[in-house]
Every structure is written in structure tokens, then in C-alpha cells.
Image: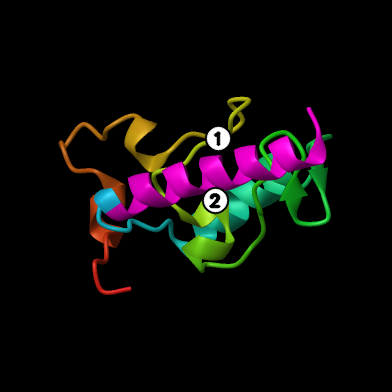
Amino acid sequence: MNETQNIFNLAYRYTRALSRWIKAGRPVREEAEIKRIFETCCEPCEDYEEGTCRHCGCRVNLTTVATLNKIAMATEECLVGKWESADDRPQPANGSRESEEHVSGNQ
């Protein structure tokens, strides 16, 4: 794949992720969850390099600004399965979903 195709694919994947996130009401992960995912899954990963996942091309870091960090978008997951979207996590026995508490349509 040439560089132009890589840029096109990255833009396409980001647009789809952004669309999913907006359609879901812009749910974001809590800062502690972002930190846990980043420090245990992304930072030690062989595909992580200087704030970017080389596997998917997305920015992954500690910022809580979802448009600047794939981890912060609760609708997104790791393409190689190292972490899941908030919607894919097991639901607690009481029937509530932790991610629903953090949905904000006012961002």
C-alpha cells in the first residue's frame, strides 16, 4: 500500500469512529479508565510508537479529549483485541452500564 492509500485508509477509519461516537451520544471513558487502558495495553504494546498505534494509525494517549484520543471514545476498541469498547464490556448484575453514566451530549 502506498502512502496516499495509507492516509486515505486512516482518514476513513477515523471518520467511521467519529461517526459511531457521535451517533452513540459522544460517550467518553473516565480519566482513570483511559489511564488504565493506556498504561496496561497501549504503552507496553509493540505497536505503540510516540502517541500512535502503528496497527490502526490512531492516536492513543492520556488525554480525555475524545477527538484526540481513540481510548477516550467509549465506542471504540483495540483492533487487535487488547481492550474493548465500553459497550462490549460485561454488564453488571444490577443491569446498569457504567458507560451510560458518562454519556454527555453537550461536548
Mark 1 highlights which residue? 83
Q: Is residue 56 left or right of residue 75?
A: right
Q: Is residue 89 left or right of residue 46?
A: left
Real-space Cα separation, disc 1 to disc 2, in angstroms? 9 Å
**85 in relation to 36, above or below:** above
**49 in relation to 67, above or below:** above
The secondary structure type at the circle numbered 2 is helix
The stretch drawn in magenta includes residue 13: yes
Query: Foreground: 42 or 14?
Result: 14
Q: Earlier in the sequence, mark 1 or mark 2?
A: 2
Badge 2: how crowded within 10 Å, few (<14), some, or many (20+)?
many
User: Where residue 30 sits in the image (x, y, percent)?
Assistant: 44, 61
Q: Are marks 1 and 2 in contact (CB under 8 Å)?
A: yes
Q: Which mark is residue 51?
A: none
User: Where residue 44 sits in the image (x, y, percent)?
Assistant: 80, 41
**87 in relation to 63, above or below:** above
> Is the stretch drawn in magenta largely helix, strand or loop?
helix
The secondary structure type at the circle numbered 1 is loop
Query: Foreground: 61 or 94?
Result: 61
Residue segment shown in magenta: 1-22
Mark 2 highlights which residue? 71
Q: Quadrant of residue 1?
A: top right
Q: Please state which amino acid type lies under the numbered disc 1.
A: Trp
Please say which color scheme the image uses: rainbow
User: Where residue 18 sits in the image (x, y, percent)?
Assistant: 42, 52
Residue that appears at 64% across and 48% down: 58
Residue that appears at 58% across and 34% down: 78
The stretch drawn in magenta includes residue 4: yes
